[in-house]
Amino acid sequence: MDTDNDNFISHNKTELNRKVSTSGRSISIEDWSDIESIISSYSSIFQNQYSLCRSFDISDRKSALIYWSEFASQRALKLINFFQEIDEFENLNSDDRFTLIKYNLLSLYLIQKCLNYNPLTGTFINRKNEDVLKRRQFFALCYGTSGIRESFMSLIRSFSKVTEQDSILINLLLVVLLFSKGLSMNETEPELNDELAVNRAQSHYTKLTWNYLVYKQGEMKSVKQFTQILTEIERLQSFTKHFREFFLTQTKSTDTLERFAPLMQAVLNVT
């Protein structure tokens, strides 16, 4: 959605170790090992984000839409690389892996943007003045007066608030939702070959997320936060469905679909 590639929150063991020292609660060695593995994988894959393209093509609407698909594809490929580090995902049937990526990746891509959001300014960080103007022109070309951009920013603000921009929590949620059959609310999504394996993986990472939250802040606050997160996930589902439909309409009207990055064609469910 957005084309920012600066990381506002550190994804390393320093933050993890800080939580260890400030919490009087305990967490199992196995859970801690799983959390560290996820954070380490994410950090190693996304540490070179600055190599991604930054220039904006604002010559016309068709060019802006194509540029979005190219940048989003680069970012999405990094997410796929991250998920390939998850053993439970790699051990799935190849068709099931394809289905989960194709139908869930757009939602996961949007969630990840919370890690780049600066709630103090209401923008994505490290923005130069000239970038701000170009970005406004770029999004005006892409979305026009549809309200897509405004809805996206509202979702980012609320999701960032309920997760408290806890990078560990967001990393865990990315994995939990990866294994969420039906997240896209797309009627064309096929049945899984091994739904039990997918459910088992989701259950494991949901429990891991819960254990982390209870360890971090206690059960009472965790119940409240979990409920709020579920509400935001429902909002995310509705927005992602609307976003996909909007982009399909725009690409058809501007005859740009065949020039979209292949991965984004698949994610938008046109191939």
Image: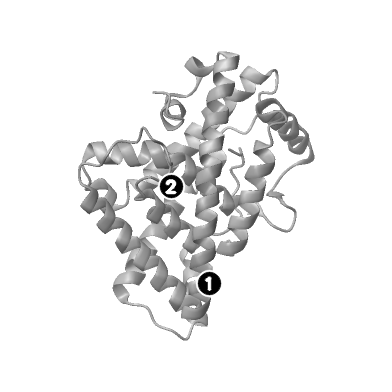
Marker disc for residue 224 = 1
Q: Is residue 18 visible?
A: no
Quadrant where the C terminus is found in the figure: top left
Q: Which of 53 and 189 lies nearest the eye of the viewer?
A: 189
Q: Locate residue 267 relative to residue 161 in the image: left or right.
A: left
Residue farthest along the front direction in this orientation: 187
Q: Are marks 1 and 2 in contact (CB under 8 Å)?
A: no
User: For the residue marked with disc 2, what is the amino acid?
Assistant: Ile
For marks 1 and 2, give the CA distance: 32 Å
Residue farthest along the top direction in this orientation: 255
Q: Residue 17, how many percent across, how many down?
A: 47, 73
Q: Residue 227, how many percent across, how many down?
A: 50, 66
SS of the residue at dot 1? helix
Say which residue appears at 70% left-offset and 25% top-offset.
Answer: 141
Look at discs 1 and 2 and give the one toward the viewer.
1
Total labels drawn = 2
Quadrant where the N terminus is found in the figure: top right
Q: Which of 240 and 31 lies nearest the eye of the viewer?
A: 240
User: For the residue marked with disc 1, what is the amino acid?
Assistant: Lys
Q: Locate residue 18 relative to residue 133 in the image: left or right.
A: left
Q: Residue 28, how many percent across, how many down?
A: 32, 77
SS of the residue at dot 2? helix
Vertical relation: 71 (above or below) 47: above
Say which residue appears at 46% left-offset and 54% top-offset.
Answer: 43
Marker disc for residue 45 = 2
